[in-house]
């Protein structure tokens, strides 16, 4: 499917965005692995939606504004992005770290969003101070992370076959992820008190085998948003859109019918 | 020429290396026996006092969650030495102010040590090694920028004497700063900052601070020292005095070559024990993507493989100076001349299982037979002459640093 990618100047910084398909808007906020605008799942989603997939600054080689230190700057930056992309009555989908961003945006003002879909999202702490709700991806060996993230680790990208440039891109995305999530790690302690403001119908879509943020975490998270639905996708880990693309898309379509 | 004697205060009594994943960050502290720790802390304090008795100055540092260095708070150890010693200069190299939450607390701690020691503090500031990011829970992003903001705040706290001022910067904000005590040395204690490459020399030279380089060896020393000297000359219109530059190397002096090698091999524990997996060496934001990628690939240091370069390799690189007094003098002299000269030798004189007796022998031979000649060497020339002479020397690039640079040069 044909896609259009452009970089748009904003009052502060710039955003690179890929659009494909036509129909109601679906704003796709990617996770820590970087943009998934090229992933086949976006072609399927574009059969029903205009998929609008911005790249968070710092990912995929894009520039980070000088004043960025973490998620709060990204959230406020995205208020400009929503204006620039004329987001209106959109399905808001956020994956992992993008799910955190989505919840932050929806809790500021949900008026632009018709529905919210959170895929293996982070962003809150649901347990006590010594519960490790979210695995520290910066504190475990890469192969262990792969096992936690995938239902079938064979579905993971084989890093040993990547060129130096491709590996530098992976490293660049990891650096960007660290910028937004280092401290407090992958969550905002103040966010739970704002979740009542997420007023659009909300679906949590969760890979049943996700070991980074488990289904227990997802269910506890969903319980904080009034009326949110929680649906698991079997034989999928942290990236259910990748491991079970068909099932993932059918759940999205069913929720947005 | 001054020589600062240094040990990292290791806790070396560990299980075999293959039985643990990392000596840093996540090595359980069940491996630390408090009884043994008590002995070691006091032993190391004795060693520093012994260094003073041999006419050397004192240097310490801090690391966190690691058996390589048992000191998580350099000022605590140095405050003991401020009381126990009376002559030695006391160098903390350094305070990891990119990771410390409150620079004013650092300003206060340093002022206290300076007053107790009657003005003997030499105060270093460092960004910190990458494996400090996790223990500090502090992002590695923009660490150098944070360092300089904290530095500015501390300098102002030391030099403001007419009541509270406010400092509201990007990372650090406080609105009623008025430290008690103020430092003994006026206007401020001498400041040192570590330099890891050409890009880090400018602000250090701008402030006329001492620029310290750890283990850059022949392959990189001139890039860094020359950078500092160029910046200094350009900004201040005069050559940087020797005492503005410092170099840290491992030094072991023996009565004969065999004993010296034996001691130096033990000293290499500092490098060979540094088993650290890539994920601790590569916190996001510390290294640029290309270097981070190489660490992920395991092609560079910090991939979980201890650094096992041989003693000969390390000596060829100018990281280790070892031998009889004559040999060590020749080695340091060669490096000194090649580097263009420096006024502070930072002597890592003890590590791992180097015994008290071995440490004292090396310290004594250094102070009696090597150090006086280094002082003469420095006095025999000027910074301008030494720099010119070094420029005329052929570049030595035949000793690649590989991951070594990443782990230790900063």
Image: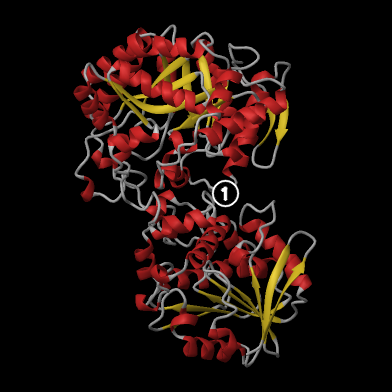
Picture residue at 35% right of the left edge, 52% below the top = B277
Picture residue at 39% right of the left edge, 13% below the top = B371
Query: Crowding near pointer 1: few (<14 within 10 Å), some, many (20+)?
Result: many
The answer to whether residue A87 of the structure is visible from this angle is yes
Position of residue A196 in the picture relative to residue A134 (left or right): right
Q: Give the labeled residue for mark 1.
A: B141
- Residue nearest the viewer, comparing B365 with A129: B365
Residue at the far right: name it.
Answer: A11
Residue A77 lies in quadrant: bottom right
Residue A232 lies in quadrant: bottom left
What x and y, as percent, mark residue B234?
71, 28
- Residue nearest the viewer, comparing A194 with B333: B333
Chain assignment, label 1: B
Q: How is the image coloured?
A: secondary structure
Helix, strand or loop at label 1? It is loop
User: Does residue A111 lie above or below B252 as drawn?
Assistant: below
- Residue nearest the viewer, comparing A172 with B10: A172
The answer to whether residue B97 of the structure is visible from this angle is no
What x and y, as percent, mark residue B29?
29, 41
Position of residue B364 in the picture relative to residue A127 (left or right): left
What x and y, as percent, mark residue B279?
41, 54
Residue B398 lies in quadrant: top left
Position of residue B170 in the picture relative to residue B330 (left or right): right
User: Does residue A234 lie above or below A238 as drawn?
Assistant: below
> Total of numbered circles in the picture?
1
Picture residue at 55% right of the left edge, 20% below the top = B386
What x and y, as percent, mark residue A155?
39, 78
User: Does residue B109 lie above or below A120 as drawn?
Assistant: above
């Amino acid at each position: 499917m044909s896609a259009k990618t452009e970089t748009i100047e904003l009052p502060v910084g710039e955003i690179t965005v890929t659009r494909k398909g036509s129909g109601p808007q679906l704003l796709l906020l990617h996770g820590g692995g970087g943009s998934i605008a090229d992933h086949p799942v976006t072609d399927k989603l574009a059969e029903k939606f205009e998929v609008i997939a911005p790249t968070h600054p710092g990912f995929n080689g894009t520039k980070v504004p000088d004043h960025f230190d973490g998620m709060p700057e990204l959230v406020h930056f995205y208020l400009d992005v929503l204006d620039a992309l004329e987001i209106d009555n959109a399905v808001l989908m956020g994956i992992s770290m993008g799910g955190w961003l989505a919840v932050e945006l929806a809790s500021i003002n949900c008026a632009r969003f018709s529905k919210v879909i959170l895929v293996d999202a982070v962003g809150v702490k649901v347990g006590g101070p010594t519960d490790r709700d979210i695995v520290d991806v910066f504190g475990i060996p890469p192969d262990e992370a792969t096992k936690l993230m995938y239902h079938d680790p064979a579905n993971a990208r084989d890093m040993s076959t990547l060129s130096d440039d491709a590996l530098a891109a992976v490293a660049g995305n990891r650096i960007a992820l660290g910028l937004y999530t280092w401290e407090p790690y992958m969550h905002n302690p103040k966010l739970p008190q704002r979740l009542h403001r997420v007023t659009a119908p909300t679906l949590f879509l969760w890979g049943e085998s996700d070991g980074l943020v488990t289904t227990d975490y997802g269910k506890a998270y969903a319980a904080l948003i009034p009326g949110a639905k929680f649906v698991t996708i079997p034989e999928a880990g942290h990236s259910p859109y990748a491991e079970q693309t068909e099932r993932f898309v059918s759940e999205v379509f069913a929720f947005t019918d | 020429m001054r020589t600062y004697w240094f040990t990292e205060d290791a806790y070396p009594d560990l299980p075999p290396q293959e039985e643990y994943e990392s000596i840093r960050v996540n090595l359980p502290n069940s491996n630390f026996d408090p009884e043994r720790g008590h002995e070691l802390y006091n032993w190391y304090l004795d060693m520093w006092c012994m260094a003073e008795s041999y006419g050397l100055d004192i240097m310490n540092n801090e690391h966190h969650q690691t058996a390589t260095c048992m000191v998580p708070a350099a000022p605590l150890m140095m405050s003991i030495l401020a009381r126990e010693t009376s002559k030695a200069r006391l160098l903390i190299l350094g305070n990891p102010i990119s990771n410390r939450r409150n620079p004013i607390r650092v300003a206060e701690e340093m002022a206290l040590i300076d007053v107790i020691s009657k003005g003997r503090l030499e105060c270093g500031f460092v960004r910190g090694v990458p494996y400090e990011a996790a223990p500090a829970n502090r992002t590695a992003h923009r660490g150098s920028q944070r360092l300089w903001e904290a530095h500015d705040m501390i300098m102002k706290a030391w030099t403001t004497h007419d009541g509270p001022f406010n400092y509201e910067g990007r990372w650090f904000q406080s609105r009623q700063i008025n430290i008690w005590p103020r430092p003994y040395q006026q206007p401020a204690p001498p400041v040192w900052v570590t330099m890891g490459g050409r890009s880090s020399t400018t602000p250090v030279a701008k402030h006329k601070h001492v620029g310290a380089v750890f283990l850059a060896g022949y392959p990189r020393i001139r890039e860094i020292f020359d950078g500092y000297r160029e910046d200094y000359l350009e900004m201040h219109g005069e050559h940087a005095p020797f005492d503005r530059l410092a170099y840290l190397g491992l030094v072991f002096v023996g009565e004969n070559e065999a004993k010296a090698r034996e001691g130096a091999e033990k000293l290499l524990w500092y490098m060979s024990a540094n088993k650290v997996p890539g994920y601790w060496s590569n916190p996001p934001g510390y290294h640029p993507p290309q270097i981070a990628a190489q660490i992920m690939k395991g092609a560079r240091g910090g991939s979980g493989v201890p650094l096992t370069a041989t003693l000969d390799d390390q000596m060829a690189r100018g990281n280790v100076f070892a031998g009889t007094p004559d040999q060590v003098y020749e080695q340091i002299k060669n490096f000194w001349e090649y580097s263009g000269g420096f006024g502070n030798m930072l002597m890592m004189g003890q590590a791992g299982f180097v015994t008290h007796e071995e440490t004292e022998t090396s310290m004594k031979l250094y102070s009696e037979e090597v150090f006086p000649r280094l002082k003469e060497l420095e006095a025999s020339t000027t910074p301008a002459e030494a720099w010119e002479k070094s420029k005329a020397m052929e570049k030595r690039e035949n000793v690649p640093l590989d991951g070594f640079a990443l782990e230790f040069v900063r």
